[in-house]
Image (cartoon, helix red, strand yellow):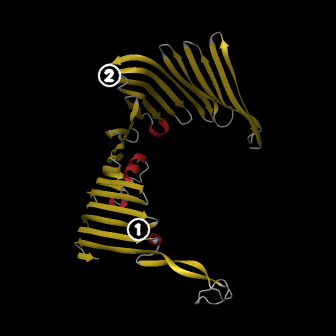
């Protein structure tokens, strides 16, 4: 781009026979490599009266591979609301055309009542893709929309003739609202061209009062594989819990058709549990819980602080193709405390680590370990090395009366009649204790114990 400058402006009329009118527009003028060109960003229009309100936004493209426009608008009366969209582009090898219309209504179809309904069409002759969609929102008949409602419903049928001929790809999606708050987002894809089914659900659910859980579930099927998985993230009673569970058969995580939702769920597990490092064959479960607490305060001439953290782990894996079976648990606890009285500090920390895992992998095995660490310090000993102590020396300047009379303690020069006399003014140290034990057994190496 050699040069360019832009324009932006608008017109607003507040009193036009009881109506309000507002318009905004912006565009660029410049040399973008093909001579002087004009590029329109958008044109927005708003008309509002006491009983009617309408808004429209249009984007124009006057250069490049896509020349045309696209826009959307909304209109609202006292009893109805409408939404529409329209686009048209001239492409190097065809055209792109799309249109949509949705209107508020009340249509009862058995157990479902539609509060809005509409449709859309999208055609691209350059890529030979043709799509039609059903749009709308609904709620269960006989139930208030304030209790539960299904918004942003979209059911589309896509024909991509270059890739699949006349075989369609059907997709559906909706947002499930519960008490006017988003509860779940649900998506389903039926790809008859590639013969696969994909379903995803992302929900926010209150597991106990005041504690929300984020749940993501995925279902994926092809003619040669299947996968069901879910992940959970929540915080309950100051404990953060993350879990993942899945079951799959011949699902290759490196395959082109494997969706990202499947890969995200499988990323919770080490690939050593997969066949050939990438194929999900079996049942997998993993959970981790973290908790912590802290307290601090001041009592007259003393102060204190206490910090606590813990972690619990559990894993279960059964890979029926590679004949791998794993069951393991683990726990970690850390405690740190400090107290200070009249400026003198004493404190310590304690850490405990316990784990056990067993199963079958080319033979039965078992491994268990336990370890602990204890540190205690006083004074400024927190920052010194383990099992060490130090004495802090201060000095007091006193008058000697004669030069070099300071019993070996002198000032900056030997002729000084003042002496810097050292004396202990602080003691610090740290004591450290640690230990561990490991017990293991395998059919190949037998029984072992290490300390």
Q: Residue 145 shows which numbered tag?
A: none
Mark 2: which secondary structure?
loop
In space, the residues marked 1 and 2 are separated at their CA atoms by 64 Å
Q: Residue 143 shows which numbered tag?
A: 2
Q: What x and y, as percent, mark residue 245?
A: 31, 50
186 left or right, relative to 36: left
Look at mark 1 in the image and give the residue it sits on: 346
Q: Quarter of the image holding residue 37?
A: top right
Residue positioned 31% across, 57% down in the render: 312
Residue 277 visible from this viewpoint: no
In terms of depth relative to the viewer, which is nearer, 353 or 399? 399
68 left or right, relative to 81: right
Number of residues whose C-alpha sits closer than 10 Å to that of mark 2, classed few (under 14), some (14–19) or many (20 or more): few
Of the image marks 1 and 2, the number of the one nearer the N terminus: 2
- Is 51 situated above or below 423? above
Residue positioned 44% across, 60% down in the render: 301
301 left or right, relative to 361: right
In terms of depth relative to the viewer, which is nearer, 408 or 345? 408
- Is 168 situated above or below 327? above
Quadrant assignment for the N terminus: top right
Mark 1: which secondary structure?
strand
Residue positioned 40% across, 63% down in the render: 338
Q: What x and y, as percent, mark residue 324?
A: 27, 61
Residue 385 visible from this viewpoint: yes
Marks 1,2: beta carbons within 8 A:
no
Judge depth for marks 1 and 2 and give the one in front. Answer: 1
Q: What x and y, as percent, mark residue 281?
A: 30, 54
In terms of depth relative to the viewer, which is nearer, 430 or 158? 430
Number of residues whose C-alpha sits closer than 10 Å to that of mark 1, classed few (under 14), some (14–19) or many (20 or more): many
- Is 392 situated above or below 295? below
Q: What x and y, as percent, mark residue 66?
A: 63, 34
Residue at the far top in the pictured view: 17
């Amino acid at each position: 781009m050699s040069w360019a400058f832009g324009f932006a402006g608008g017109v607003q009329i507040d009193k036009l026979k009881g109506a309000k009118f507002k318009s905004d527009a912006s565009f660029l003028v410049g040399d973008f490599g093909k001579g002087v060109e004009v590029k329109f960003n958008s044109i927005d229009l708003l008309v509002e009266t006491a009983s009617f309100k309408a808004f429209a936004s249009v984007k124009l493209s006057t250069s490049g591979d896509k020349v045309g426009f696209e826009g959307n608008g909304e209109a609202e009366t006292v009893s109805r609301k409408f939404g529409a969209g329209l686009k048209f582009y001239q492409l190097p090898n065809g055209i792109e055309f799309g249109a949509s219309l949705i209107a508020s209504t009340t249509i009862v179809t058995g157990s479902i009542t539609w509060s809005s309904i509409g449709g859309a069409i999208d055609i691209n002759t350059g890529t030979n893709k043709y799509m039609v969609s059903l749009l709308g929102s609904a709620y269960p008949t006989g139930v208030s929309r304030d209790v539960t409602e299904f918004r942003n419903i979209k059911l589309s049928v896509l024909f991509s003739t270059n890739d699949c001929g006349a075989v369609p790809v059907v997709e559906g999606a909706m947002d499930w609202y519960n008490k006017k708050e988003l509860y779940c987002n649900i998506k389903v894809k039926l790809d008859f061209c590639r013969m696969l089914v994909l379903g995803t659900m992302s929900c926010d659910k209150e597991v106990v009062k005041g504690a929300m859980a984020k749940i993501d579930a995925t279902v994926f099927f092809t003619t040669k594989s299947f996968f069901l998985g879910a992940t959970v993230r929540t915080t309950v009673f100051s404990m953060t819990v993350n879990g993942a569970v899945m079951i799959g058969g011949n699902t290759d995580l490196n395959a082109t058709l494997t969706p990202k939702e499947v890969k995200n769920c499988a990323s919770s597990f080490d690939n050593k549990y997969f066949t050939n490092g990438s194929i999900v064959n079996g049942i997998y479960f993993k959970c981790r819980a973290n908790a912590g607490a802290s307290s601090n305060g001041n009592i007259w001439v003393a102060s204190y602080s206490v910090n606590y953290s813990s972690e619990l782990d559990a894993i279960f894996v059964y890979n029926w193709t590679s004949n791998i079976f794993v069951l393991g648990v683990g726990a970690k606890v850390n405690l740190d405390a400090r107290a200070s009285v009249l400026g003198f500090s004493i404190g310590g920390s304690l850490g405990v680590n316990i784990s056990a895992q067993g199963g079958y992998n080319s033979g039965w095995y078992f491994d268990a370990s336990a370890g602990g660490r204890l540190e205690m310090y006083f004074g400024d000993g927190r920052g010194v090395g383990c099992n060490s102590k130090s004495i802090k020396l201060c000095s007091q300047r006193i008058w000697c009366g004669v030069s070099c009379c300071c019993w070996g303690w002198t000032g900056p020069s030997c002729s000084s009649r003042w002496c810097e006399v050292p004396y202990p003014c602080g003691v610090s140290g740290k004591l450290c204790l640690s230990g561990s034990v490991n017990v293991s057994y395998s059919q190949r190496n037998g029984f072992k114990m290490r300390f």
